[in-house]
Image: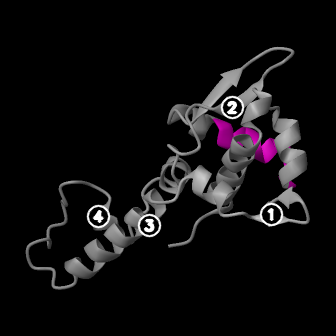
Amino acid sequence: MKISTKGRYALRMLYDLAVHQEEGYVSLKDIADRQSISKKYLEQIVPLLNKTGLLRTNRGNRGGYMLAGKPSDITVGDVLKATEGSLAPVACLDFEPNECPRVNECCTLFVWEGLNKAINDYLDSITLQTIIDRGNVIGGDYCI
């Protein structure tokens, strides 16, 4: 499993919003500048995050984006599932129940189920607040 640029940038965008939540709505231009990410690329990510309810949007002169929830309630798993879709290591685990015709005779299914559980448990255990609290401070600035 590889996490795409879209997933990595979405996490950085939401991290940036979490760090700057006291400022209210934040413009994409400000996020793009601080995170060294193309504003146009962020514009492609926003609909995915809006659709899953991770962002709040405000249009107009003082418009921008803010987190729809507390940083302690938004997990890395939430962000990556919104941008990457399924994080399952094999296609047969994309749906519940498993519809694979070999499900009852697959001798390796337990391997993939265990890996899937480990991936999801790990990513769902890390929140935006966890990342902030981890102290990713470099030279007085927050991490990018």
Measured as percent of width and height from the top left, residue 95 is found at 27, 55
**Which three-letter amino acid code belongs to the residue tagged 2?**
Met
- Disc 3 target residue: 122
| Label 2: how many Cα within 10 Å (few below 14, some 14–19, many 20+) | many
**Which three-letter amino acid code belongs to the residue tagged 3?**
Tyr
Report the Cα–Cα distance between label 2 and label 4: 33 Å
**Which three-letter amino acid code belongs to the residue tagged 1?**
Val
Report the Cα–Cα distance between label 4 and label 3: 17 Å
Q: Earlier in the sequence, mark 2 or mark 1?
A: 2
- Disc 1 target residue: 137
Q: Quadrant of residue 130?
A: bottom right
Instruction: Give yes or no for residue 40 being in the magenta stretch.
Output: yes
Secondary structure mostly seen in magenta is: helix
Of residues 65 and 99, the one drawn nearer to the viewer in this rendering: 65
- Disc 2 target residue: 66
Image marks 4 and 1: residues in contact by CB distance under 8 Å:
no
